[in-house]
């Protein structure tokens, strides 16, 4: 978020260089992180580049394709957006790769989020790998009945439709069964629960969190009051 | 003691009742077996006896569910949960899917009850001990065999400390070893004074386990009696129930003029 | 098990091993030859490799070691869609395969994929639905059927493909007495038509009554292999015990009475009747 507020090139690059990359090195996931964020950002990045380079009005025309002029101002704008996007996707990727969803949700509940909301959030986070696994089994069953999903793209696409129904329906059945099973265990009882453990929270993590909040608030404040220094 | 009196229940959206005029009494410490053809109404009886129907899934109920003399009508499910719980056949959906360890899974129920932490821990430990699965405590719930995960599901129910436990085909998905483990667990539970209502197709399992058996056919309880009374009843096949192996063999022997008592002694 | 030299093999597995990508070894050095028309039951504890093994028969899994030959052709040279015409596999969980809006449409999916059309297709579909006893519900939405009927529907959807080899993974799970009898009739009918039937099962009575050969799996390998009378006979009880399997009651009684191998009620009664009365 900070990256968008700061703007320019230097701000997002500073965030990447001073915050994200060091944390990632500590976590030891730099390679995976770059791959993940690159894949996440690519589709948006392509459209941003196309749209801003060709539609941004400006005086420095680089070249023209039909009615569209590519301007220097457009390139500049696209560049600024791209570094911000990349900073954000790196930050999200870092969060995803280093945070245990279970611990996160548990901690949210400890901090006052309702147990029901915490459960739904947790179940949602865990649902993706389950769905992928289920889709695999279902597809195996359809292939066993002669559905050809090997080879061409068309063959693969043909295999998608018979997959959708059972994936959704069996997930729904499962959700229904699971919610009954949870109700049996007093899930719907109103009021707070006593939790068994707290996610470890070292002093340095607390300091880092507050530092980030502080940095974000001051950047916003500087922007709003117009005192933000001009960055390249 | 749990009692169904004159119960007729219709699922939401259906005109015809799934069960009608059901009377059933479950005494403390007893294991009552429920047998019958598929779609005869056994699962519906489980849902009604546990209070989930209609409290959780809606539908129309007439007649009463009473536990230890108190009528349960109108009570929210979380209040019922301390008196009666129900487990289903698919152990995968019995587990919350959010716990990191078996211990945490078993602790969810007591946590939901709002108990203090020492009590939660005590209950979870006790539940694992009753089923002799303390060694699974630190395991990931999604990395268990079918039998193990069914035992964990049952332990999660026991941790609620209900006086009555209803199990709908707990061994259907299990191999012979898993079935044996669940059988032993049920016997251990009944020993603690807990009342059990168990739906099963595996009559060999019920044969050694249940004092009484009730037969469900076409939405009604058509016969009730001791295990040997029920399993020797010649109408068993008409009710869609497989007789235990000893009974089938006994009949085959008798059919050829051989004395089962001598052969099976 | 003696295999006549004249009998062609429906399936031939030699030295088949499978190691999953995560390094778990599920199968080790499995040799198995199944003659055409045989009824073969595979038993063993959960996790012993039974389901992994049958997924090799139609190419859903490929061996990481050894070779699978189906009907004389190396399975490695065939796509799953091609193998599906030879080996029909009914999965244990019907909800992982049912997707159509009606029983009839669900059953027609397989044979249609195999290129069958028109009257031929309709006959195959109607026959399969009839065989599992769902004729009255041909137009019903599968999700309005109970679990045991959805399982029968999954069976019908494979029967309709008329494959020479039919593989059933835990067909009797959740079935009542009538459902089990129905499945036993289907197995007998398939065998009478010369088809090869392979079933995974935990139900020892079903195994002893409906199959002529039993393969016991333990930790990814075959530990016992023979006719039920042999596999369930006294000398094998320790080996069965190691896999937590108990021989069916008539086999135990027959052994105790010194009548030898009597894995079914009928065989025990016959053996008793032949014995001189004392």
Image: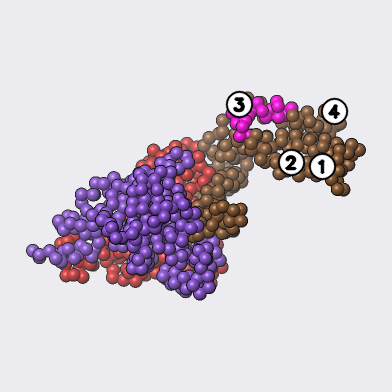
The mark nearer the N terminus, 1 or 3, is 3
Given the image, what chain letter belongs to the residue carrying mark 2? A
> Where is the N terminus of chain C found, in terms of image quarters?
bottom left
In the image, taking residue A210 as reference, residue B211 lies left or right, namely left
Q: Is residue C223 magenta?
A: no
The red one among the chains is B
The CA span between labels 1 and 3 is: 36 Å
- The disc at residue A45 is 2
Q: Chain of mark 1?
A: A
Answer yes or no: is residue C77 visible: yes
Residue A26 numbered tag = 3
- Residue B43, x across and y down, in percent: 44, 61
Q: Which residue is mark 4?
A: A230
Q: Earlier in the sequence, mark 3 or mark 4?
A: 3
Identified at 26% across, 64% down, the residue is: B248
- Residue A52 tag number: 1
In the image, the segment drawn in magenta is A14-33
Reply yes or no: does residue A16 show up in magenta: yes
Query: Drawn colour of chain C?
Result: purple
- Where is residue B102 shown, x and y percent of the image? 45, 41
Side (left or right) of B212 relative to B7 = left
Give SS at disc 1: helix
State the brown chain: A
């Amino acid at each position: 978020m900070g990256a968008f507020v700061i703007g320019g090139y230097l701000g997002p690059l500073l965030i990447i260089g001073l915050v994200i990359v060091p944390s990632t090195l500590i976590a030891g996931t730099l390679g995976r992180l770059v791959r993940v964020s690159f894949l996440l950002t690519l589709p948006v990045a392509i459209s941003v580049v196309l749209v801003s380079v060709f539609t941004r009005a400006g005086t420095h025309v680089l070249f023209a394709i039909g009615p569209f002029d590519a301007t220097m101002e457009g390139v500049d704008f696209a560049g600024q957006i791209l570094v911000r996007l990349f900073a954000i996707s790196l930050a999200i990727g870092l969060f995803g790769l280093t945070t245990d969803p279970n611990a996160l949700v548990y901690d949210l509940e400890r901090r006052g989020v309702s147990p029901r909301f915490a459960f739904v959030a947790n179940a949602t986070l865990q649902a993706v790998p389950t769905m992928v696994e289920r889709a695999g089994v279902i597809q195996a069953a359809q292939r066993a009945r002669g559905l050809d999903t090997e080879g061409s793209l068309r063959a693969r696409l043909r295999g998608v439709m018979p997959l959708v129904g059972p994936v959704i329906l069996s997930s729904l059945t499962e959700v229904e069964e699971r919610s009954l099973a949870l109700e049996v265990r007093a899930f719907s009882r109103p009021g707070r629960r006593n939790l068994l453990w707290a996610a470890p929270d070292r002093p340095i993590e607390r300091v880092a969190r507050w530092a980030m909040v502080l940095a974000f608030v001051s950047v916003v404040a500087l922007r709003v009051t117009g005192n933000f220094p001009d960055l390249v | 003691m749990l009692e169904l009196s004159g119960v007729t229940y219709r699922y939401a959206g259906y005109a015809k009742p799934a069960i009608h005029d059901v009377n059933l009494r479950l005494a403390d410490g007893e294991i009552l077996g429920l047998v019958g053809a598929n779609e005869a109404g056994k699962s519906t009886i489980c849902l009604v006896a546990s209070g989930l129907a209609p409290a959780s899934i809606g539908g129309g109920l007439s007649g009463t569910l009473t536990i230890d003399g108190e009528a349960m009508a109108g009570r929210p499910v979380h209040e019922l949960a301390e008196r009666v719980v129900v487990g289903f056949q698919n152990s995968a959906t019995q587990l919350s899917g959010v716990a990191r360890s078996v211990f945490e899974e078993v602790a969810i129920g007591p946590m939901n009850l709002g108990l203090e932490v020492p009590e939660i821990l005590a209950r979870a430990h006790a539940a694992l001990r009753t089923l002799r699965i303390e060694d699974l405590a630190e395991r990931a719930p999604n990395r268990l065999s079918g039998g193990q995960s069914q035992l964990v599901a049952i332990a999660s129910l026991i941790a609620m400390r209900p006086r009555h436990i209803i199990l709908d085909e707990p061994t259907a998905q299990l191999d012979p070893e898993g079935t044996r483990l669940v059988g032993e667990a049920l016997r251990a539970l009944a020993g603690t004074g807990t009342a059990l209502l168990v739906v099963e197709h595996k009559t060999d399992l019920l044969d050694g386990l249940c004092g009484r058996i009730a037969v469900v056919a076409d939405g009604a309880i058509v016969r009730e009696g001791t295990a040997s009374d029920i399993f020797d009843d010649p109408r068993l096949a008409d009710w869609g129930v497989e007789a235990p192996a000893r009974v089938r063999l006994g009949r085959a022997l008798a059919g050829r003029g051989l004395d089962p008592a001598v052969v099976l002694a | 098990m003696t295999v006549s030299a004249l009998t062609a093999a429906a399936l031939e597995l030699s030295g088949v091993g499978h190691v999953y990508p995560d390094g778990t070894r599920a199968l080790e050095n499995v040799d198995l030859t199944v003659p055409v028309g045989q009824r073969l039951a595979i038993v063993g504890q959960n996790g012993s490799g039974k389901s992994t093994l049958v997924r090799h028969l139609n190419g859903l899994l490929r061996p990481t070691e050894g070779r699978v030959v189906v009907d004389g052709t190396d399975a490695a040279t065939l796509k799953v869609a091609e193998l599906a015409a030879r080996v029909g596999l009914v999965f244990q969980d019907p909800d992982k395969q049912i997707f159509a809006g009606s029983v009839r449409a669900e059953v027609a999916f397989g044979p249609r994929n195999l290129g069958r059309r028109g009257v031929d297709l309709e006959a195959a579909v109607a026959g399969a639905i009839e065989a599992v006893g769902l004729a009255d519900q041909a137009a019903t939405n599968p999700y309005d059927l109970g679990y045991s009927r959805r399982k029968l529907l999954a069976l019908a959807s494979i029967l309709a493909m008329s494959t020479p080899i039919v593989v059933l993974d835990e067909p009797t799970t959740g079935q009542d007495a009538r459902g089990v009898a129905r499945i036993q009739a289907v197995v007998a009918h398939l065998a009478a038509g010369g088809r090869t039937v392979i079933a995974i099962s935990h139900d020892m009575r079903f195994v002893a009554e409906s199959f002529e050969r039993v393969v016991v799996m333990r930790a990814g390998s075959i530990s016992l292999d023979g006719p039920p009378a042999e596999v369930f006979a006294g000398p094998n009880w320790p080996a069965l015990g190691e896999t937590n399997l108990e021989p069916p009651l008539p086999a135990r009684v027959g052994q105790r009475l010194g009548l030898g191998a009597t894995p079914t009620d009928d065989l025990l009664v016959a053996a008793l009747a032949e014995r001189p009365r004392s």
